[in-house]
Image: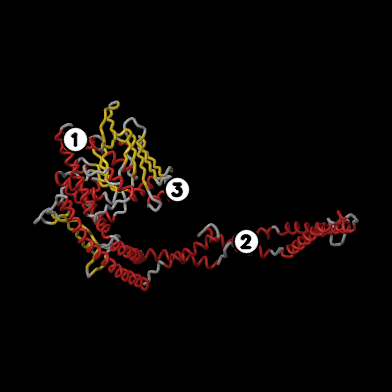
Amino acid sequence: MLAEMRIQGLGVIDDATLELHPGLTVVTGETGAGKTMVVTGLHLLGGGRADASRVRSGSPRAVVEGRFETTASSPAVKVASDAGAEPDEDGSLIAVRSVNADGRSRAHLGGRSVPNAVLAELAEQVLAVHGQNDQLRLLRPGEQRAVLDRFAGEPVLNALADYQRVRAEWADAVRELTERTERSRELAREADLLRHGLSEIEAVAPEPGEDVALVDEARRLADVDQLREIAAGAQLALSGAADGDPDAPGAMGLIGDARRRLGSAEDPALRDLEPRVAEAAAILADIGGELGGYLDRLDADPARLEQVLARQAELKQLTKKYAADVDGVLAWAEDARQRMSGMDTSDEAIAALAARRDELAGELAEHAQKVSAARQEAAGRLAVAVTKELVGLAMAQARLEVVVHQKEADDSDPAAILIDGRKVHAGPDGVDEVELHLVAHSGAPALPIHKGASGGELSRVMLGLEVVLADADTVPTLVFDEVDAGVGGRAAVEIGRRLARLARTHQVIVVTHLPQVAAYADRHLVVDKGANDGGLTRSDVRTVADERRVAELARMLAGLDSTETGRAHAEELLATANSHKTRDGWAENGGKSKRRGKKSEARTRS
């Protein structure tokens, strides 16, 4: 969870530290005080786009720092470890995002500089921010399908994984068949060129490394007289003249004389040197033998030199066309053989590919139907659960419907398959389209939520979805920015009640302008607009409790913080919220709170 966040130089906030509760934390304040900077800071901390306009005027940079409390098994720790960062000794993971006045940003995690994408990956594991933009995303069909899949869990996800595996094979078969049929002439020409090249290479039949070996042999043949003179001279120096000329005894004769002299010496120190001289004699004898063998092998045949030069010319013709050396030519030939295996445009090859495509299409249709069936079953349960939540959100007559239908395809659709005789579009996430429909009241038609829901109703639908999906959501911290926009009265009370319920299993942070919601907080933070600092508004964040919290709620109710009536209304609101939290926490959990340990203690103290 996010235990603490510090904001410096961001918008109207010069320097503020927010200590967040493991349960429900609300952030309130007057319009223009800078409440939205809290959410902006969370977006930056989560790898969101940097915006230089958010940097406080006169500040060199804006800095947001978050301290996350983690466990060794937390996915966040793995993200940090993969980036070369580690949590502190107390298990805290520190993330920092800074934005310079020129728009450039830097990210740090666990004390190490990391790419901004690492913070985005971290946020996927620990933070889910829901604001007005998220409500707009909920209007997209893809997002609505994702919501249903998230609720359905493994039955859909497992079936979808099988579908996607088969779809990848089917798509490859379709692509290859299309390429072979539509590009048959082009492929045939390319195959002819490859075949011609292979014929040339096979006719020459080069061996690996042959060009290098021929260069050495050609050099040896061209310099044979010089090489023979060098080898013969060296052999003479070792062995001496063949006629035994005493004036040219050679190294072997001299060493033999040295051995005899040392061996006959009466001094042991000299005799001990004789074995070492004997070793030198043995080495020289071996060298002399190798020189003799070299001279015997040294071929001065001009015909062999002509053969080598002719072979080099043949190889050079290949290296001019296909690669820089013989090994590269052989690699080209192997690649050409593999490419040609996929260029068979014969009727038999096309028929075999078509059969494989149709076989995979049938298998894909079976998996698609399993995905559709799992979604249909989950759709009914999701609709009932969210409708129940809407009743408590002052939408007693409203009903949510989750409509799942297969997307039809036309004849030109390359991703079409047949299911029960109908052509449907086989997309990467299945063949289904999912739409959330809202029946606003009894007798009203079921309309897509972008047509049938007002802004306030859309906010409540989203909150109802979050409450229902809480058990399926592995992200520990949920952030709501003005989720209560467009609502009030009884609906606002129920929104606060459900946020408090959601906070039993998640850390929840809410930016709100409604006292009915703020009354349910475990911790209440207020963004205060302070005095101008050189013509600039300066805001701070403080924690309020007891009398100060009553005063803030009274101000939110009607600006009546200094009157007895306003304070009485605020105290009544707090009492009602505490009563609901106590009743919900015990009645719905069999007399036991879901929170354990420090989390429960913190909630009790608040």
Nearest the camera: 439 or 519? 519
In terms of depth relative to the viewer, which is nearer, 413 or 549? Answer: 549
Q: Which residue is mark 1?
A: 555
Question: Which of the pair 321/179 is nearer the observer?
Answer: 179
Residue 159, image x and y in percent? 30, 64
- Report the number of numbered marks: 3
- What is the C-alpha distance between the residues marked 3 and 1? 48 Å
Q: Locate residue 494 relative to residue 158 in the image: left or right.
A: left
What amino acid is labelled 1 in the image? Arg
Q: Earlier in the sequence, mark 3 or mark 1?
A: 3
Residue at left offset 57%, top offset 65%: 207
Which residue bears the numbered disc 3? Answer: 84
Which residue is most to the left?
443
Identified by mark 2, the residue type is Leu
Q: Which residue is mark 2?
A: 214
State the image coordinates of residue 559 (x, y, percent, origin top left): 17, 34
Would residue 157 be visible to someone looking at this image?
A: yes
Q: Is residue 578 above or below residue 348?
A: above
